[in-house]
Image: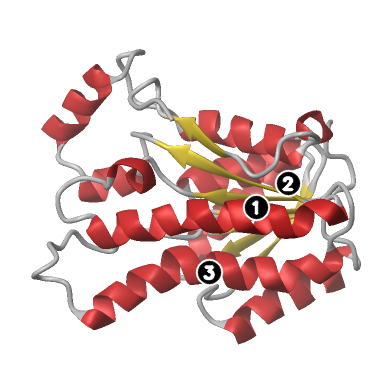
Amino acid sequence: MRLTNKVAIVTGGSRDIGRAVSCQLAAEGAKVVINYHGNLQNAEETLAIITAAGGQGIIVKGDVTKSAEVTSLIDQTRAAFGEEIHILVNVAGGMIARKTTLELEEEFWDQVMNLNLKSVYLASKAVIPYMSSGASIINLSSLAGRDGGGPGASAYAASKGAVMTYTRSLAKELGPKGIRVNAVLPGMIATTFHDTFSKPEVRVNVANATLLKREGQAQEVADLIVYLASDQASYITGNNIDINGGLNFS
């Protein structure tokens, strides 16, 4: 129980990697705020898993690309669990669609950047006043942020590369306060993201290109994130940590 009585917020915490993170944080003793945007059923299912295992949590609807809704998320967290927030995991994000540069409309570019980058900035800015030494922020970037992503993923890859850079900047800013900031960069993980955006044959080829010859699992990403949130990672900050089965070396 590495996180007993810690308070954790997980944006996009209701499904896939977000669900695995929310459940694992709770399993380690944290009080978990599961943020969701569109699917209440997924959020309720995630909370049910947590409570059935004896954990504590609440669900909070909110669009984390909008500052007022992020403020509401923080206010509801404080109302439920007190003034101290120890962990923020910025999972919310997505590709939305695959589009080449010539197909990219300005509005679509802004939408992707807001979803993947602005959300990290807004949530981090809102939570920092309630964090003290020992707190941790973990951002979700992507292998695409290193290698540019697959066909039609330029906006997504650019946004995730920006998350990597912002992670380093925020770590420098918050380090003197004892607050750690890291990012996790998943490769091919078996989630609905790839069910939606990756062809089956591409997934097989990518899995076979990894050193471990398989896709990763959401739980494996969650285990890494929970480690980074814990005191066991107390001297790790400013890092972009790959979890891709050896597909790409940093």
Q: Is residue 2 left or right of residue 165?
A: right
Above or below for 74 versus 146: below
In the rendering, at what x and y percent does residue 101 appear?
Answer: 14, 66
Above or below for 25 versus 8: above
* Residue at the spot 19% in from the left edge and 25% down from the top edge: 204
In the rendering, at what x and y percent does residue 176 appear?
Answer: 84, 54
Q: Which residue is mark 3?
A: 119
Q: Secondary structure at mark 2?
A: helix
Q: Is residue 189 left or right of residue 65?
A: left
On-image quarter of the N terminus? top right
Q: Quadrant of residue 85?
A: bottom right
Q: Of the residues tagged 3 and 1, which is closer to the observer?
A: 3
In the rendering, at what x and y percent does residue 69 appear?
Answer: 61, 81
Specify few, some or many for label 2: CA neighbours under 10 Å numbering under 14, 14-19, or 20 or more: some
Sequence-wise, which precedes: disc 3 or disc 2?
A: 2
Tell me, yes or no, if residue 101 can be seen here: yes
In the rendering, at what x and y percent does residue 183 appear?
Answer: 56, 45
Identify the disc placed on residue 107: none
Specify few, some or many for label 3: CA neighbours under 10 Å numbering under 14, 14-19, or 20 or more: many
* Residue at the spot 62% in from the left edge and 57% down from the top edge: 169
**Kind of residue sitting beneath label 1:** Leu
Sequence-wise, which precedes: disc 3 or disc 1?
A: 1
Identify the disc placed on residue 47: 1
* Residue at the spot 28% in from the left edge and 62% down from the top edge: 155
Q: Secondary structure at mark 1?
A: helix
Is there CB contact under 8 Å for labels 2 and 1? yes
Q: Which residue is mark 2?
A: 51
Q: Is residue 205 left or right of residue 168?
A: left
Above or below for 150 versus 7: above
Q: Quadrant of residue 11?
A: bottom right
